[in-house]
Image (tube, rainbow, N blue to C red):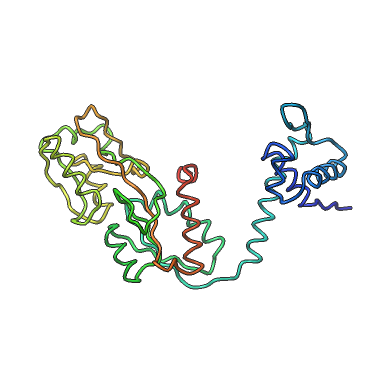
Amino acid sequence: MPHNLDIGLLRAFVAVVDAGGMTAATGLLNLTQAAVSQQIKRLEETFGEALITRDRRGIGLTAAGERLFGRAKRLLALNDEIWTEMTTPEYEGEVRLGIPSDIITTYLPSFLKSFARHYPRVQIALNSGSSAVLRAKLDAGKVDVVLATEMTCGPEGENLVMDRLVWVGARGGDAARQRPLPVSIGCSDCAFRAPIRETLMKAGIEWRSVSEVTNTTAQVATVAADIAVMAWMASTVPDGLEVIGPEAGLPPLPPFMVNLYLPKNGGDHVVQELARHIREAVRDPRRLAA
């Protein structure tokens, strides 16, 4: 005969463990301490075993409580996912995302799968280009959400990540030691262009441009061939290339930001949801590394 678990009791159990005590869990559950204690008692009676121990140092888990805790969290997550999917309206249509090509590989997978799972009927149309161009498109209503790489964050933007700008070269290459320094640099409105030029000028290092393109694949190819170096955000260094250390004599580059921009009116529900998925993914380094 099947037995049905009480989700409410499991939620109380997990809240008590996560919060570190009955009193702390009351705020999470919006229940009185007596009600929380009663729910834990009912759960223990359900399984016929003690789950939580109490002493002067706080609460702990019995062996049975340890077995239950991880499984209870997974069940609650599945319960909440089902509830969200079954009660969220089925939105359809398209949301236009602007994202520079140099961060697509690192950032896009971190939120795209989750968003597509929650909104399977919404298509994401990708727009790639420099951050300046993408922000202009947002102002013109041609895109709905923009992720930008910038030295500062505009007043209407939201900073998600602060990252290092680093010199990148071929593994074991010697392009970094050549003078004038061969640099694969972006087009005229590339956000990295001005910091590269100013940093090298202040360091008194002569340099020459090997390529000036918006296509990051072409930039990476010149660096992989060891005919140039380039500046790249540390979290997005392409596979097969390496960060050039100070022993090569190149000056440190300034930090950069990954910023989020939405329409002035905030956008519709789908735009807001895409922005939420981006925030959760980009601010969690574990998901970027996955």
Q: Is residue 36 left or right of residue 200?
A: right
Percent position (x, y) of residue 239? Answer: 35, 42
Q: Nearer the viewer, residue 128 or 258?
A: 258
Q: Is residue 209 left or right of residue 214?
A: left
From this view, report whether residue 107 is shown above or below residue 253: below
Q: Nearer the viewer, residue 17 or 278?
A: 17
From this view, report whether residue 142 is shown above or below residue 190: below
Q: Nearer the viewer, residue 287 or 238?
A: 287
Percent position (x, y) of residue 280? Answer: 50, 51
Task: Choose top left, top right, bottom left or bottom right for residue 15.
Answer: top right
Q: Is residue 95 left or right of residue 119?
A: left
Instruction: Please report the residue visible at 40 percent of the width from the left and 48 percent of the height from the top.
Output: 106
Q: Nearer the viewer, residue 108 or 262?
A: 262
Instruction: Please report the residue visible at 13 percent of the width from the left and 40 percent of the height from the top.
Output: 201
**Tally of numbered tags:** 0
Instruction: Please report the residue visible at 11 percent of the width from the left and 35 percent of the height from the top.
Output: 204
Task: Choose top left, top right, bottom left or bottom right for residue 16.
Answer: top right
Percent position (x, y) of residue 44? Answer: 84, 41
Instruction: Please report the residue visible at 53 percent of the width from the left and 56 percent of the height from the top.
Output: 114
